[in-house]
Image (tube, grey):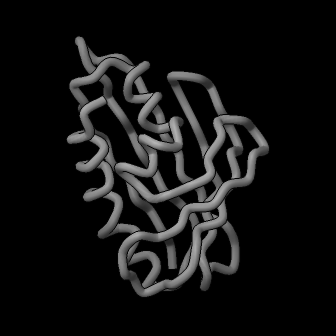
Amino acid sequence: MKLDVDIDEYLESPPPEVWKALTDPVLLARWLMPNDFEAQVGKRFTFAPDCPTSWEGSVACEVLELVPVRRMVWSWQTKGMEHPTRVIFELSASGTGTRLRLRHTGEADEPIVRDLKGGWPGKVASLKDLAI
């Protein structure tokens, strides 16, 4: 099944602060999940889920692209996914804040697609609420 999450959100913090929330493992854990992330192309990292979903286990990721304070792309694969999907973060200055566009694309089984489509808006809301 096609996965197509596309969220465009305004955050009141300037791009460098939003970027820090996306790339600092401690801040990333506060709004997304516990992790061993490092902002380095080719770095493989893992998210450990902190909430019940239809999938169990961890999320295996890799940093595919990194343009500081502008764009980051991860591969994303959980149990039950035949192939990795992609998570794309794009930041642009907007007034005194940041326009964040998050896209998650690829193919996955229906329960995973449903969980991701339902989960990302709440995660982005947590990011937005995070005191950066």
In the picture, measured across the screen, residue 37 lies left or right of residue 21, that is right
> Going 53% across and 36% down the picture, which residue do you hit?
23
Q: How many marks?
A: 0
Q: Residue furthest top?
A: 95
Q: Position of residue 16 (x, y in %)?
A: 43, 19
Against 30, residue 130 (above or below) is above
> Going 62% across and 52% down the picture, which residue do you hit?
36
In the picture, measured across the screen, residue 60 lies left or right of residue 105, that is right
Q: Residue furthest right?
A: 42
> Going 44% across and 62% down the picture, which residue do you hit?
4
Q: Nearer the viewer, residue 19 or 4?
A: 19
Q: Residue furthest front?
A: 26
Q: Nearer the viewer, residue 81 or 43?
A: 43
> Going 28% across and 57% down the picture, which residue do you hit?
121
Q: Position of residue 128 (x, y in %)?
A: 25, 40
Q: Where's the C terminus, which quadrant?
A: top left
Q: Position of residue 9 (x, y in %)?
A: 27, 39
Q: Position of residue 39 (x, y in %)?
A: 64, 36
